[in-house]
Image (spheres, rainbow, N blue to C red):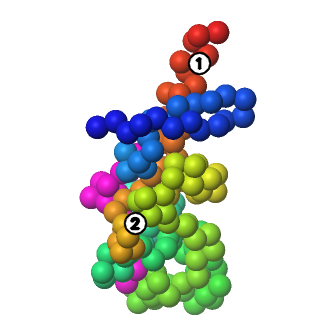
Amino acid sequence: MTLPAQRLYIPGIFLYEIMTNILQLLTPKKFTYYLDENCTIRQALEKFDAHRFSVVPLINEQGKYTGTVSEGDILHYIKNRAHFDVHEAEKVLIKDIEHYRPYRALYSSALLVEVFALSLDQSFIPVVDDRDVFIGIIKRKELLSLLSDQFLPLTKEK
C-alpha cells in the first residue's frame, strides 16, 4: 500500500516523499545485532569482533531500548582501569560502564525528517514502539539510498 505523497523541501528542490512511514526503511530486530544490557564486556567484545560492528543497541530484559554501547565506550573503560584483565571483563556488565555517545531512538511514528536529522550524528537510528520496546534500526545507508533514488531521476532529466 502506498501512502499519499507529501512534499519535502530539500534546498532548491521539492521531492515527493513516498515514505511517510519510516517502518518501510526499518531493519527489523531479528535481522539486527544488539546486546542485552546485562551482558559482560567480554561478551560484547566477542560480538564486536565476530560481526565487525563498532556500536550496537542495548536492550533490557523487557526488550526495551536502553542505549548503545561502542567499542570506544569499552576502550575508555579499559583505559581508566589500571588493572583490567580478561577475568574482570567477564564480571563487568555493559550497563555499568559509561557511554560517551549515546544514540537517540525514535518512535515508529516519527517523521522521516526526524530520521534524517538524527542520521547526521548517528550511523543508525534505533526504533521503538509506543511501549519503548526495541523493534529494529534504520541504517544511514538506507537513507542515502532513498535520497539517491530521489535525486538520480532529477539528474538524468537535465
* Residue situated in front as seen by the camera: 23 or 141: 23
Quarter of the figure with the N terminus: top left
Residue 11: name its quadrant: top right
Residue 69 percent across, percent down from the top left: 50, 71
Circle 1 crowding by C-alpha within 10 Å: few under 14, some 14–19, many from 20: few
* Residue situated in front as seen by the camera: 148 or 9: 9
Is 20 situated above or below 41?
Answer: above
Residue at coordinates 54% horizontally, 84% vertically from top-left?
97
Is 158 situated above or below 30?
Answer: above
Residue at coordinates 49% horizontally, 63% vertically from top-left?
106
* Residue situated in front as seen by the camera: 87 or 74: 74
Residue 155: name its quadrant: top right
The local secondary structure at tag 1 comes to: helix
Residue at coordinates 59% horizontally, 38% vertically from top-left?
8
Distance in Å between CA atoms under marks 1 and 2: 34 Å
Image: magenta residue range: 25-38
Question: Circle 1 sits on which residue?
Answer: 154
